[in-house]
Amino acid sequence: ESTEYDEPNQDITTNRTQGETTLVKVPSGSEAQKEQSNQDAKQSGSYLELDKIWTPAYYGDDKHGMGHRSGLYSDEHGNLKLTVGKKHRTFDVKWNGEKYEVEIDGRRFTGRYLSKLTEDVNRVFRGDESIVTTPRKCASLVYHRDLVSCAGDMQINKSSLEVRENAIGKGSFGEVALADYMDSQGTKSQVAIKRVSQTSPHTLGSAMEVAVLASISKTHKFNLIKLIGWYLDTDALCIVTEYMPGGCLANYLEGLYNSSDLVQQREFRGFVKD
């Protein structure tokens, strides 16, 4: 599902940081001007290293796409910002090594994750000044640090995958591909790769999906689809799970539920019980 929003006088350039490709919004102009802008941002103390942003695709919500509501976004230099209310008052959000913090009208708000920072701000700012947490048309802002904190041990290298079929399924989030995966022990298996496009309103939910599946995959109490891992591509978050022939997990469960076969009915009841 493609969404559109205005980005007047902006270019998209590619920045390579620690081996990863990062899409960065920069103002139009010469390369020297762009480099100077980034240097100025670093010296201001509010600059966030681009490899800390969950991207290469998710460079943050566009300030002008939020209307009169408050929200978090990253600017063209990679700085994290909070805009508040109809007047679009803007404040720097910083990382102090342990948590995010922002100072508004002399009051300091903090949070270990951006979601916790949002909760802290919304305890004071209500109504039109509360931070928007519902999906917007812009690409959702999620930081690499947050995802790594929840599921860093499940991050895998794209080179361990060999795509066999590019589109075995499709949804509003993007497409699902079929691939062969080679684990660290040299064992090969078939997997499904769910690609969540940077323009999809499902980006934040998909990051949460990774965190939940990572937690569940560490136990044997739940008979759920197994998370193999995740990685970042140039235009998407890629979620790698075990391959289920015949469709997605939801379709599989629906088939068991509606089946007249006693064996399949018992399988469904066993799944629900687990």
Image: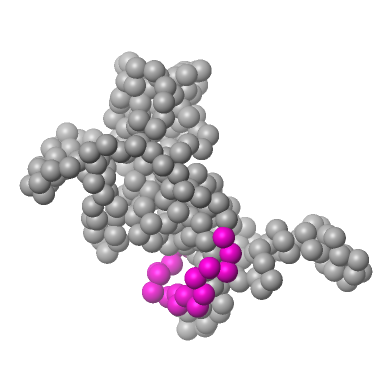
Q: How is the image coloured?
A: one colour
Q: Residue furthest left?
A: 32
Residue 79 shows up from this direction: no
Q: Position of residue 181 (x, y in %)?
A: 50, 76
99 is higher (above) or lower (below) than 35: above
Q: Position of residue 8 (x, y in %)?
A: 27, 36
Q: Residue at 50% of width from left, 21% of height from top?
A: 123
- Residue 159 shown in magenta: yes
Residue 86 falls within the magenta-colored stretch: no
Q: Is residue 121 left or right of residue 76?
A: right
**Image: magenta residue range:** 154-170
Instruction: Classify residue 201 as left or right of residue 10.
Output: right
37 in relation to 189, above or below: above
Instruction: Tell me the residue at 51%/56% (across/down).
Output: 174
Q: How many marks?
A: 0
Q: Is residue 222 left or right of residue 156?
A: right
Give residue 12's position: percent from left, percent from top.
26, 49
**Front-lying residue, 133 or 212:** 133
Query: Splitting the image into 4 quarters, where does residue 109 fall?
Result: top left
Quarter of the figure with residue 108: top left
Q: Work out whether residue 166 can be spotted.
A: yes
Quarter of the figure with the C terminus: bottom right
Spot occupied by residue 149 in the image (x, y as percentages of width and height)? 44, 51
Which residue occupies 52% across, 82% down? Answer: 188
- What residue is at 53 percent from the left and 68 percent from the top? 167
